[in-house]
Image (cartoon, rainbow, N blue to C red):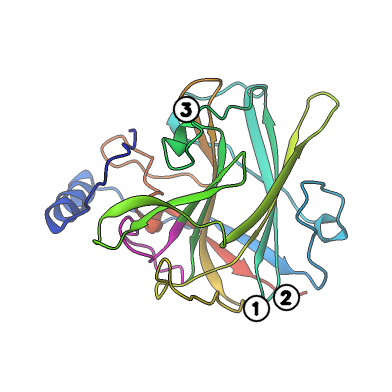
Amino acid sequence: MTRKRFKPVFNTLTKAVFIYSVLASGATFANMTEDEAAYVSTPPVIDGIADDDAWKDVKWNVMSSQMWGTLPEATDFSGRYKLRWDERALYLLAEIQDDHLSDTYADPLERYWDDDCLEIFIDADGSGGDHFNNYNAFAYHLALDNQVVDIGPDENGDAVAQLYNDHVDSAWKRDLTPPFLVYWEAAIRVFDDSYQHGKDNSPLTLKKGMQLGFMLAYCDADGKDREHFMGSHEITPVNGDKNLGFKDASVFGKLILKGR
């Protein structure tokens, strides 16, 4: 499945067809996979250098679930990640092995899923459901130039690609020794469904015990359009399609915010 750059409208009829296809397939969207993030009193510096105390003694989670395209060789792509949090943000460290970094499309809103990018899925209350043309959840595409893109309603209510650079601070660096791993750090401010693009919005204050919807994925393009799409959580396909996270938060896993 590919995403086109025209202004798609996820209208009532489209929603009805989508829901019917889910019910007819017998698939369930419930994703019981759970991650945990421990509180951190001194957050990591977001610089792509993975030497912060915040990351020490934190377990790695793997990105091994095929969501679209072909299954890559480990030298082509493999990935894993760590998570921490404080009141201001969720913190992510991803370790990516990618033998070819690709940024083909200069316009950050043009075919952004066909460039190499890290995709962070966040649902503030873990409620799941449609988020294609609303802010029930977010699917942030972090580009190699640190632009942050997702689909959301424009002033006419149409679903279009827009920038959300104030939601995520990110930085990455590549190791200079084989296997030339990329370390990508991010601080993600969490917004709930009251968010309005272009307005004055305040992120949530994160608290111990909160359960967020969460998933992580990587779009892998080797000098051309995306070839692999690998994620952190297994998705039950609907009519053979696992590429559902960009429009339905019910396929996300759960992320529990733990104490110190």
Q: CA distance from mark 1 to mark 2?
A: 6 Å
Measured from the top left, where is residue 34 in percent x and y? 56, 59
| Above or below: residue 247 compared with residue 87 | above
Q: Nearer the viewer, residue 191 or 234?
A: 191
Mark 2 and mark 1 in contact (Cβ < 8 Å)? Answer: yes
For the point 55% across and 74% down, the residue is: 203
Q: Secondary structure at mark 2?
A: loop
- The answer to which of marks 1 and 3 sits earlier in the sequence is 1
Tag shown at residue 259: 2
The local crowd at label 2, few if under 14, some if 14 to 19, many if 20 or more residues have their Cα within 10 Å, is: few
Q: Nearer the viewer, residue 173 or 248?
A: 173
The local crowd at label 3, few if under 14, some if 14 to 19, many if 20 or more residues have their Cα within 10 Å, is: many
- The answer to which of marks 3 and 2 sits earlier in the sequence is 3
Q: CA distance from mark 3 to mark 2?
A: 38 Å
Specify whether 154 is left or right of 78. Answer: left
Mark 2 and mark 3 in contact (Cβ < 8 Å)? Answer: no
For the point 45% across and 68% down, the residue is: 126
Range of residues picked out in magenta: 125-138
| Above or below: residue 250 compared with residue 21 | below
For badge 2, the amino acid type reads Gly
Mark 3 and mark 1 in contact (Cβ < 8 Å)? Answer: no
Residue 42 visible? The answer is yes
- The answer to which of marks 1 and 2 sits earlier in the sequence is 1
Specify whether 249 is left or right of 119. Answer: left
For badge 3, the amino acid type reads Arg
Specify whether 111 is left or right of 254. Answer: left
* Mark 3 or 2, closer to the camera: 3
Q: Which residue is mark 3?
A: 226
Q: Main secondary structure of the magenta part?
A: loop
Tag shown at residue 208: 1
